[in-house]
Every structure is written in C-alpha cells, then in structure tokens.
Image: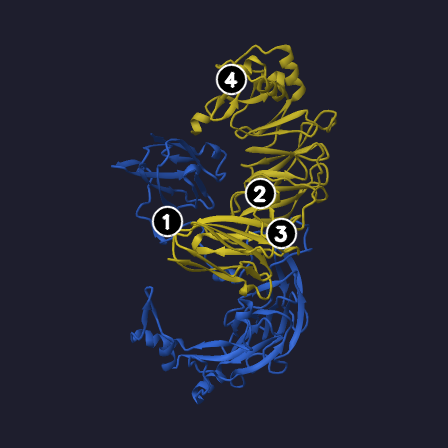
Chain colours: A yellow, B blue
Amino acid sequence: FEAGVSQNTTDFLHIINWHAAEEVFLAGDTVEINGMQVITLDTAIENNLLFFTPEPRSPHGADVAPHGDFIVVSGKLDPHVTVYSFQKIMDAIEAGVEETDQYGVPIIPMEDSVEAQVEVGLGPLHTEFDNQGYAYTSLFLDTAVARWSLGGENYRPEDGWTLQSTVPVQYNVGHIAAAEGDTVDPDGRYLVSLNKWSVDRFLSTGPLLPQNLQLVDISQSGDFMQVLYDMPLTGGEPHYAQIIKADKLHPWDVYPEIGWDPVTQSVSPDAVEPGEEGVFRDGNNVTVRMTAVRSHYTPEHVEIRQGDHVTWTITNIERARDATHGFALPYYNINLSLEPGESITFEFDATRDGVFSYYCTEFCSALHLEMMGYLTVQP
Amino acid sequence: FEAGVSQNTTDFLHIINWHAAEEVFLAGDTVEINGMQVITLDTAIENNLLFFTPEPRSPHGADVAPHGDFIVVSGKLDPHVTVYSFQKIMDAIEAGVEETDQYGVPIIPMEDSVEAQVEVGLGPLHTEFDNQGYAYTSLFLDTAVARWSLGGENYRPEDGWTLQSTVPVQYNVGHIAAAEGDTVDPDGRYLVSLNKWSVDRFLSTGPLLPQNLQLVDISQSGDFMQVLYDMPLTGGEPHYAQIIKADKLHPWDVYPEIGWDPVTQSVSPDAVEPGEEGVFRDGNNVTVRMTAVRSHYTPEHVEIRQGDHVTWTITNIERARDATHGFALPYYNINLSLEPGESITFEFDATRDGVFSYYCTEFCSALHLEMMGYLTVQP
C-alpha cells in the first residue's frame, strides 16, 4: 500500500464549501447510502462546493492558523510546511478554475493558493500555534519540535515565514499540544510533546517501552525553547490532546442529583431510592433494585433461579465527594465504578447456578471489606 | 455483613505449620474438592498444623518483620498495631495449648503470643519496614503514615516499641511500599504511599477523582519524614506494590528470538518467517500466516469465505528496540500490540461478509498510515 498510496507527485488538499454543502443537503439533492444522506461527487462539482489544490505527498496535519487566514499542511515526505492562504483560495475560485482531475474536480494551481513554504525539518506532522505569532510543527524523523514564524499583518510581519529554532524531544513525536493552541486565541507559554518511542530515556522496562509526554517552555521569543518535564505513560500511543485553561471548565464535584445517569445526563427512570430496594420477579424476568452507601449494599442477599433474565440497578446514594463505590460480580463479568449519585443498570442471563459473591472494589471506609453480599442462583 | 463480620470481641490470627501441612499432603491424608487436594479441619487439628491466637477485630495487614521474628497485625478498628513473637508462638505450642474454639482449633492466649502493642493512630492497615529498625503503618482514618520502632536486639533495643512520628498523606492511604520493605534486607530511604481519595489535592476533574501516589523521604531517623512528590493516577484503586532496586532486574530489550510467545516464553511453533507468509485453506479452516515489519503487513490482502474458521498468526520480525506494531481488525474485535520479535495467534469465525480493513495502531514510521491491508470475506 505504501507504493499505491504515495505513487503521485503530489496529493490534494480538499477544499469544501460547507455552507454550500448545507444548502445542497437542505434542498434534498442527496442520495441515501446505508441510511446516510450523501452528496455525490457530480453534485458537489456542479454546485461549486469541492475544489482541490496540490500539496506535498503523504500529507499528515492540516491546521488552521488562529485568524482563520492560513492553512498549514505537512507532507511528511517533504521537509517543508506548506502554508495556504484562505483569501487566495477564495480569489482563485472567484476568478474561475480551469484544470480538473480525471473525475472533474477543479484543481486550483499551487501558485494561486500557496502563501509560503518554510523548511522546518524531516518528517513534519502536526502544527499548533501560540500568542506570539509562532507556529510549532512536530518533526517525527528529526524527533524535534520546530518553531517558525507566521507572516502577514496578523502575526509577525517583520520576521515571518522563517524557521526560528528546534527543540529535541525524546523521542519520535507525533502530536503536539500548545496551550489553547487550536483556538482563535492561543494562550502560549507551554507546549506538550506527545512522544511515542522512549528508547534510552528511562530504565528499561522490557520489550514494550512507555510512551513519553514532555512539557516544553515556549514562553520566550526567538530561539529559546526548553524541555521542562517528562511524564512517561503506559497504555496506547498518545494521539492528540487539547490544553484548556482550568478556569474555563466547571466540572461537577458530584452528580447534580441522586440517581444520575452519566450517559443521558439526567436522573435515570430506574434509579433506586432508599426504602425501594428489593428483588422483583415477573415470570423469568427478575429486577434487582439496589442502593450502595458506605459500606453496605441493600439488599445483601439476592436469590434467583437458573435461567432467569436479570435486570439489576445499583444507585450510589452518597453525596460526599469521591465516595465512589465499585461493584464486582466476577463470574457474570460485571465490574462497575459508581461515582457519588450515579445509577447504573446492567443485565445478564443467569446461566450458571451457585452462590456468587458481589463486593465493593473501592476502599470506601474502614468497613469496606464488609461491603459485599451474595447472589444465590438456584438450580 | 458488617455486624456479622465484626460481631466478636476479637478475631483470630491463623498460624499454619506449612512444613507439617506438606507432610500431610505428601502422605495423601487429604480429600479432593473440585479437583483440589484439601486438608480437612479435623486432619489439621490432629496433625498440630493449625493454631489460632486472638487479634484485634476487623484485622487487615499481617506483615512479617525482616528477621522473621515478629508478625505485625493491624486491626483496623483498634488504634494499635499488635506485634506477635514467632518464638513465643513456637514456645506456646511446645508447652501445649489447652483452649480450643467451637471447632476444636487450639487457641494460644494473647499473653503467650504477643510481644508488644504500639498505639499508632486510627485505622491502621498495612506495615512495611526499613533498614533503620523502623516499621511504617498506613493509617486509613488518620490519612497518614506512622513510623514506629521495632524493639529487640535485631532492631532498636534502646527505643523500641514506640511511635516516632506520623506524616500526613493526601488522602486515605491503603497500601504503602517501602524500598524492598517486604524483604529480609529492606533498602530504606523511600516509601510510596498509595492513596485512594484525592479530594482537594488537585483541580477538580469531576465526580471520579484521580488516585494519588506520594513519594515520602524516610532516609533520616527519628521524627523526620517528608512528602517529596505527588503522582496522580487514573484507573482503579492502587492496591499493593513492590519497590525493587533496578540493578536486580535484567529486562530484555527485545525478545530473545523472532517468533517469541511471551506466554510460553519460547519461540511459538506457529511463528512465521519471511517468505512463509500466505493464506492456507483446509475445508472451512483457514490459516493466515503474516509478518509485520516497518511499515508492511505481508500479505496485504486476505480473502476468505463467510463461515470460515480463521486461525491467524502475526509475527513481528523487527529486532530494533521499541519497534512495536499494532494490529487492529475492529469488526472482529481484534486489537493487538506486537513487540519486536513477538508472535501472536488469534482465532475467529468469519460470521459477516464484507471488506474489513486491518491496520497498524502504532506510529511505527513516516509510512505508518500505509501499514494496512484488507480482509475480504466473500458471502
């Protein structure tokens, strides 16, 4: 696939006029495929809502600058970032586009769409922005982050479109995240490099090495950038992140009401109030209604019959912060985390008879070990 | 269960002579229950291999001091740690034990088994040891770690059996880990407190708060201990850990040979060598033999029929450190991590026809996005 995917001299940046696409959709000029309304290529071309312009091949990131005026594309087999001008693209479309590809999609020549190219290093992938008019591009092959200057009156008219500096990162950066760096008003100051390979950075942990996130100081201008901190992580490859200032977030400390379903963001109709607990039978359908509070489940005994279909709701009736309870019923593959106020409903078929313990998996109080009960499945 | 579990004035430390138990097992004096050879209570009593001694109720940790001479028990509803003497227990058994419980298990009186009790604080759970003759006990309710001195000639004969200091931790510690603190030769210097609740320690992250590990300096003697560092963690409650000096570990950087099966710790008989790849059919049983190397799977097309049973082996033939590849075939719920040299075999039934892409999930090179292929399941 390598040869097939990268066989052309250039790939194409796809330019979609989504206001025009919305009008086509609202006019019903779509076809239904697998239940989705789809605008065909011919319709898109007829309605002037799709254009191409060439870009360096094997493109990776396509990132829009804070003022919406430039689009930065990294072709990872090309050492440059290519910066397209939104205004130039609009002007070219206005003036009329002659060339098309084999399917009839109009192609805007690069000389009519590109504002600048800046050589940043090997393997450029993704670009983020700061509050000083700089852009930052991750360099996978150079295993570094490049700082370069955006030109034009909105950014750095005096020293625009030049590489300022690179800072080595350890190692093989993919995505980067600058503080609010994807917004119309980047915060600057800090950037996190989300690195994949960490060979030789830490003591060996065996064949699978940790991923590594690095905090980089980008607060000064010019060529100074500095790695401040490493945070190795287990788990999968880090893939994209956003840094948002904490004062923009207003998280709940506990869910607003007891019986909260985090999926629907409302009180669950199945939520159990204290005093309503019990085991209810309707033919082979059994409903278990349970509450959890430090350090009891109510009921502590649930008796059913083999072959029953079980619908089981647990409501954590705590209001204290961090009074999370767990619920494990391992044979039936149930393992829950119930935050304060949360209500969860699960179902299973009681396929095997026996006595099965259920128990809390969070050390919720000094009596946590006693927060358990028994499910008896009669044969 | 709280009432039932904690209804007696004391619980019992169970003392098992496992050398004697081994002899009983080897003599065949066991009964088989669910395929396990079990020594009955009567046999255990007859052979003098089980004794009880009272301990404070709702016991949690039972930790053996470095010289094997003391056993430290925390009854989490009692503010003391209770220290039992191995020699006193052996002497009491030698002298003969009169009292028994209702099942006939001999009970050694506390005054014959206990060496000391030290009041350490509320909610004591687990105890670790250092190289200065100190013990450290986690205090769940006080949300602190207590340092106290072991007495006797092996530890601190001059100031033994006294509380030295407590250090607050944030918050609600369960387990603690001192450097090699569970061994005959503790390393001292550092202790990690594995804390569960982190209310008010960090910016709010919503109803589910991070767990928090804290590094504590225990290198000085007397009453000085200091929290050096916080490490908040997502995921489940931290539960036990060991700190082992890195020079005792000799991890492989890559697996010793290509085709390695980490489960059997040997080369898999199914491992695929370059040139052996292919799709092989025997009736409805299809065997896929695949290699992975930056940035290709071989083969890139796999064509089978609906109803086939598929046995699929992938061997990562890389020898470079950290050249991990992933393999995802989402519809069939396959998602693998293949470290350098590793071979994995999985099976599934091709229940659904269609064309399914498979692809690498680790950014393995600049051509990672092209590391993919297609599984075609003919109807």
* Residue A263, label in figure: 2
Whether residues under marks 3 and 2 lie with C-beta atoms below 8 angstroms apart, the answer is no
The residue that label 4 is drawn on is: A41
The residue that label 1 is drawn on is: B260
* Rendering coords of residue B126 (x, y %): 56, 69
Residue type beneath disc 4: Leu
Q: Is residue A157 visible?
A: yes
- Tell us which disc is closer to us: 2 or 4: 2
- Mark 1, chain letter? B
Give the CA distance from mark 2 to mark 4. Answer: 37 Å
Taking the image as shown, residue A374 lies to the left or right of residue B141, namely left
Q: Secondary structure at mark 2?
A: loop
Residue type beneath disc 2: Val
Give the CA distance from mark 1 to mark 3. Answer: 48 Å
Quadrant in which the N terminus of chain A appears: top left
Q: Report the residue that reaches farthest toward the bottom.
A: B95
